[in-house]
């Protein structure tokens, strides 16, 4: 766990430097590109929530895959309390969550 913390810390520093460098035109990771972990999680969520109208998965650990932020909007959440919506997302990502340190979930119902 300590090794991951060090890896994540250096990755966050690296990501910070990337942001600074991006301002002068030397971007190492495109803003629109996704990491393998982001793509994997998005794929699982698209399969589990086929009615999702919006989905955004962001690796907020700086690229090491330790923590993600998920924004998902789906009519499948209608009639469910926020905690129940989050439980559905957690259940969908049961396998992926085992290797994470944290997960931020934001759910919405389409208007």
Image (spheres, grey):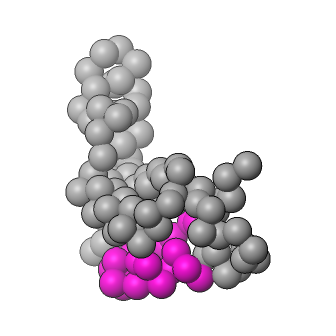
Res 22 → quadrant? top left
Give, as a single range, the part of the protein colored magenta: 87-105
Q: Is residue 103 above or below residue 23?
A: below
Q: Is residue 100 left or right of residue 74?
A: left
Res 73 → quadrant? bottom right
Q: Position of residue 34 (x, y in %)?
A: 30, 46
Q: Is residue 78 above or below residue 59?
A: below
Q: Measuring 67% from the left and 81% from the top, which residue is drawn there?
A: 84
Q: Measuring 53% from the left and 49% from the top, which residue is drawn there?
A: 54
Q: Is residue 106 left or right of residue 81?
A: left
* Magenta segment includes 47: no
The answer to whether residue 89 of the structure is visible from this angle is yes
Q: Measuring 44% from the left and 55% from the top, which residue is drawn there?
A: 57
Looking at the image, which is closer to me, 57 or 6?
A: 57
Q: Position of residue 28 (x, y in %)?
A: 24, 32
Q: Is residue 100 above or below residue 47?
A: below
The answer to whether residue 10 of the structure is visible from this angle is no
Looking at the image, which is closer to me, 12 or 48?
A: 48
Looking at the image, which is closer to me, 105 or 76?
A: 76
Res 19 → quadrant? top left
The total of numbered circles placed on residues is 0
Q: Position of residue 108 (x, y in %)?
A: 67, 58
Question: Which residue is farthest top?
Answer: 24
* Magenta segment includes 93: yes
What quarter of the picture does the N terminus occupy? bottom left
Q: Measuring 41% from the left and 77% from the top, which residue is drawn there?
A: 93
Q: Position of residue 66 (x, y in %)?
A: 38, 68
Q: Is residue 3 left or right of residue 73?
A: left
């Amino acid at each position: 766990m300590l090794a991951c913390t060090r890896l994540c810390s250096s990755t966050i520093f690296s990501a910070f430097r990337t942001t600074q460098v991006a301002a002068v035109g030397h971007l190492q990771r495109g803003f629109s590109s996704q990491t393998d972990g982001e793509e994997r999680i998005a794929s699982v969520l698209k399969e589990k929530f086929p009615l999702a109208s919006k989905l955004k998965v962001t690796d907020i650990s700086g690229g090491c895959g330790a923590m993600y932020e998920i924004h998902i909007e789906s009519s499948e959440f209608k009639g469910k309390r926020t905690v129940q919506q989050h439980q559905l997302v957690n259940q969908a990502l049961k396998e992926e969550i085992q290797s994470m340190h944290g997960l931020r979930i934001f759910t919405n119902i389409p208007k």
